[in-house]
Image (tube, rainbow, N blue to C red):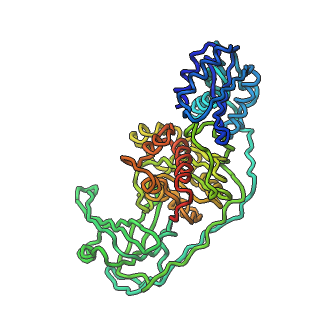
Amino acid sequence: MVEDILARVREAEGLKNAIISGVTLDTAAGTVTVKLVTDRAYTGSDGETAVAAVRPFVPDCFSLDVQISKLSPDSGMIKRRILSLIGEKFPALSSVIGEDDVSVARSGDGFEFEVRALGGARSENMVREVEAALAKCYCGGFRGRVARENIDTSGIVVEREAEEEEYEMPVRSFAVENFRPIEGGEKPSRAIYMADFNFAAEKAVVCGSVLDVSERAYTRSNGEEKPYFVFTLTDGTGTLRLTWFSKKKSLDKVRGVKEGESLACVCRSEVRGGMLRYTATEINYGSVPENFVPEKRPARPVPNGYHTIKPQPFTDYTQTDLFSDGTLPPCFKGTSFVVFDLETTGLCTVPVPGEMDGIIEIGAYKVVDGEIREKFSTFVNPERPGRLDPRIEELTGISDADVKGAPSYKDVLPDFVKFCSGSVLVGHNAVGFDFKFIDFYCRELGYAVEGRVIDTLTLSQRLLRLSNNKLNTVADHFGITFNHHRAEDDALATAKIFIELIKIKKSFPDC
């Protein structure tokens, strides 16, 4: 809608580069006020053109007041705004970009700017975001480029705001019951929780029910084929996939193991290809204690400060519907929500180490008292071997270079945990997809992200009558435009959808 209005407004010569700086609705007076900013001299005729352009979009029951003001930024103003935007959106790059690294020159109806920075996709992405942000603030066009330069970063010192106390994650265990030998050996007294087994070890005991077992074969160097087995076990706290290489004396007995039976396995874990792999060295029958209730592990404390990714203040200058009633339900008062979205290496949400796909981008917005106030956004290195799946690159536009040059998920997630602390999580299909990744990898690091998760997919299914409830379909219903399949954009669209859905429901869901 905004672009349609501006296209008509810009037919006036004096409003050729105009932008909408604000829209207010006074229901008591029955008046809609639209504020336009232009960088050109304008006439009364231009004002009449603006009124005629906006009037069809305002309901007949409201009168219309179009207010026009002139703003002509100079190069210095643009330069200061560029430096401010880089600091807000790209704190890591801002540490090596100073005033002397930005040059601005007027060009036609707008400005051209150049930023001397390290080359690569992140710098190019920075320039594109700065262009878009400038276009929202000032009239005219903005074109930027990166002047690639080798910057000496050896002297840069990154200070950590708050030192964290050393934290050692406790490893829990339970007594093994109903031991019966298959391969023999000593009866293990205790088995560690599978949820805690995320480290390399030469000899560890796990025990649980068989969810799946498959027999496969590999070819030895002498051409001989030998069978091996892959077991998927669960003990109620987590799931592990173990490989067992056959031994002649116990092969037939292991072949007899069926789904639903319970095993106690001595195994080793080692990092291969960047992932933890688990190999059973000894297999016997054994089970978890009857009526086993997992011991709750103390969660790692929420970090004292942000260390890798800091949230940025956010102001939404656009509206989902320029002329709708913006009054928020009273239930929003005193509330805090984090609306988030992820991009991942794939769609596998099976909580098995080595099988679960990885996170490559996090986008999140904090909604306080019904207003979007803060943004948390970053690419994430999932620390996976090999390149990103080309289909993921094509779908998201995220390149392998973006991911490889990004901070590790081990550094990003503690900051995300802090960002979410004290807030209710919200996402579109979050319960069925996104939250599973957050829960899995946070637990791997010792953090517990617990509490309610509101799913706007479920909420829209209950409240709207749509052909489907995909994110883009619901966004279209509310007139929200966004760049789909990028976490930051999806999260912002979801935040706006969430607010609109609660305006309809007038209360928060119980789920």
Q: Is residue 1 left or right of residue 415?
A: left
Residue 361 at x, y percent in the picture:
53, 46
Looking at the image, residue 485 lies above or below residue 511? above
Residue 404 at x, y percent in the picture:
53, 42
Which residue is depicted at the point 62% across and 23% down?
144
Which residue is depicted at the point 51% across and 44% down?
490
Looking at the image, residue 291 lies above or below residue 167? below
Q: Using the rendered view, name the quadrant where residue 29 is placed.
A: top right
Q: Is residue 278 left or right of residue 133?
A: left
Instruction: In this rendered view, identify the residue nearer to me: 228 or 54.
Output: 54
Looking at the image, residue 477 lies above or below residue 417? above
Residue 49 at x, y percent in the picture:
60, 18
Q: What number of labels is visible?
A: 0
Instruction: In this rendered view, identify the residue nearer to me: 225 or 115.
Output: 115
Which residue is depicted at the point 72% across and 30% down?
81
Viewer can see residue 89: no
Viewer can see residue 20: yes
Which residue is depicted at the point 63% across and 46% down?
375
Instruction: In this rendered view, identify the residue nearer to me: 217 or 455.
Output: 455
Residue 53 at x, y percent in the picture:
56, 23
Q: Using the rendered view, name the quadrant where residue 135 is placed.
A: top right
Instruction: In this rendered view, identify the residue nearer to me: 159 or 83.
Output: 83
